[in-house]
Amino acid sequence: MTIDLHLHSTASDGTTPPGELMRLAGAAGLRVAALTDHDTTAGWAAAAQALPPGLTLIRGAELSCRWHGEGESIALHMLAYLFDPVHPALVAALARVRESRLGRAERMVALMRADGIDVDWADILAHADGGTIGRPHLAAALIRAGLVADTQEAFGPRWLGNGSPYRLPKEDLDVFEALRLVQAAGGVTVVAHPRASVRGRVVPEQLFGQLAAAGLDGLEADHHDHSPAERAEVHRIAAELGLFTTGSSDFHGTHKKVRIGEFTTAPEALERIVAGATGATPVTGVAG
Ligand code: AMP
Ligand code: ZN
Ligand code: FE
Ligand code: FE
């Protein structure tokens, strides 16, 4: 049973529409696929409608969060599964984050234009087609302008990555607030790629104990941004805290090289997600 619990569609910064993503997931041999777009549930309906027979959809999202520790704060991503998509406080929080992403991306574009970089905000918005805006949309504009060869280069220090003068912060949710909101909406929570040092600073290990005490359910261990040592570290931390672990592709279409189902989750972890959730149910595609 192949289970991949972290996939992005054009509802955020993936390049595959949600329905097409479900067809690809079925063709890739998945039995269970989670749709986890950044800060939105906008792709849920289209994904549920397009399920091939026998493929089960876990409806989810990836919440942009921040830990405000001592000194500098650190960004982290929280996967949320099977929560109530109309829970008012959660809906409002996600809308706030998406709004802040819009303003931030527009300001980043203005900074680039002021430096003579040929990117256009209206054009970027049109290409995003209503999906949650992120730096991959700006990367795509840089590629269209012929300024970089690929997304990887666009995420270098000259353009959109760490150390870039154009990289601006967005207003993330406090990670404990996000946890409370998802719990209130009946969802299950998993910290995404918690040890991905290639992306920048990672949170201290003690935070996972605090989050576990506050009701966190799992940690994503097997992910392409984790080295083998980082994967092992996440498995150890989860075992010590009684959290389950997941493995997932974090598929983004053509933005990244990773394939659907390249990393997978054990059935026991999926059982804990389904058993722990009260906000939404898995949906399975039926024939005809
Ligand atoms: P943002 O949420 O706007 O800060 O952009 C972060 C998103 O950019 C992540 O969710 C990934 O989809 C993507 N991303 C981050 N780093 C890279 C990279 N080095 N190569 C390709 N995509 C990346
Ligand atoms: Zn993304
Ligand atoms: Fe992420
Ligand atoms: Fe992701």
Image: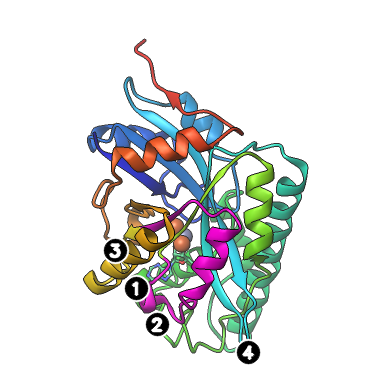
Q: Which residue is mark 4?
A: 71
User: In the displayed structure, does residue 176 sit left or right of residue 78?
Assistant: right
Q: If you read the primary sequence from the N terminus, does the residue marked by circle 4 or circle 3 appear first?
A: 4
The foreground one among 280 and 105 is 280
The yes-or-no answer for disc 1 within 8 Å of ligand 1 is yes
Rendered location of residue 221, percent (x, y): 33, 60
Looking at the picture, how far across and down is residue 76, in whole percent? 52, 68
Magenta residue span: 194-220
| Residue on which the image places disc 1 | 152
Residue hosting label 3? 224
Classify residue 151 as left or right of residue 121: left
Q: Are marks 2 and 4 in contact (CB under 8 Å)?
A: no
Foreground disc of the pair 1, 4: 4
**Residue bearing mark 2:** 156
**Mark pair 3, 1: CA separation:** 14 Å
The answer to whether 44 is drawn above or below residue 65 in the figure is above
Which mark is in front, 2 or 4? 4
Neighbour class for label 1 at 10 Å: few (<14), some, many (≥20)? some
Q: Where is residue 201? Give x, y as percent.
A: 46, 82
Q: What is the quadrant of the N terminus in the image?
A: top left
Identify which residue is drawn at 28% across, 43% down.
266
Q: How is the image coloured?
A: rainbow
Please, what is the three-letter code of the amino acid marked with disc 3?
Answer: His
Disc 4 secondary structure class: loop
Q: Is residue 205 visible?
A: yes
- Residue at 38% across, 72% down: 196
**Marks 1 and 2: CB-CB under 8 Å?**
yes
